[in-house]
Amino acid sequence: MATQRTLLIVKPDAFKRGLTGYIIWRLERAGFSVVDMRLERLGKEKAREFYAVHKGKPFYDDLVDFMTSTPVVAMVLEKENAVADLRTFIGATDPAKADCGTIRQEMALNIQENSVHASDSPENAAREVGFFFG
């Protein structure tokens, strides 16, 4: 299998609790390489554009407000089978359904404040990496 790149975002709930370094440490120990990283305060328009796939859903406005509430840390990760491996590593969106030992099971506060975002397909990974890192 070829090396892939994918995007991970440390969300505001984890950033506020000082978990960014721990998340990076966990990622590196799991074999992911951080190849680019940026601390960024998303504006409303950028957050709306990034989460456009959810426009019209009941949680969309709350998601935009949440993602713009503090800076986030966006990073490009590289690894063989990176997209699927990262999704497994972070766990289910709902931390109550996430497997034991995953990032979300361990750190997330609830389904919205679930600590991290990760690309869900190779196609979305390419789009999302380009969105943050051009």
Image (cartoon, grey):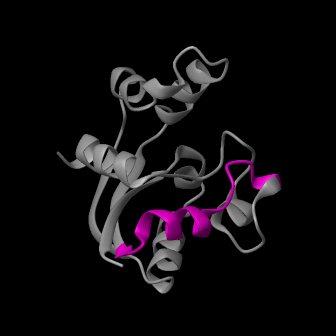
**Which residue does the image show at 72% across and 42% down from the upper left?**
111
Q: How many marks?
A: 0
In this view, the residue farthest toward the front is 1
Q: Is residue 1 above or below residue 67?
A: below
The residue lying furthest to the top in this view is 56
Is 106 or 20 nearer to us in this picture? 106
Does residue 71 show up magenta in the picture? no
Q: Residue at x 36, y 25 (%)?
A: 49
Task: Quadrant for residue 14, please give it.
Answer: bottom right
x and y, in percent, of residue 63 in the image: 57, 29
Question: In the orientation shown, which residue stands out farthest toward the left?
Answer: 134
Whether residue 29 sits left or right of residue 108 in the image: it is left
> Is 57 situated above or below 20?
above
Where's residue 60, x and y in %? 58, 22
Give the residue drawn at x 36%, y 79%.
1
Left or right of residue 93, residue 45 in this image = left
Q: Position of residue 37 (x, y in %)?
A: 29, 60
Q: Nearer the viewer, residue 20 or 124?
A: 124
Task: Work out whether residue 17 or residue 34 is closer to the camera in this orientation and state it.
Answer: 34
- Left or right for 28, reference 16: left
Instruction: Kindly give the residue lying farthest to the right in the view shown.
Output: 96
| Image x and y of residue 3, in percent | 30, 75
From the image, give the main secondary structure of the stretch colored magenta: helix
Up-down relation of residue 61 to residue 131 (above or below): above
Residue 86 placement, left or right of 3:
right
Residue appearing at x 42%, y 23% in the figure: 48
- Quadrant containing the C terminus in the rendered view: top left
Q: What's drawn in magenta, residue-wise?
A: 79-96
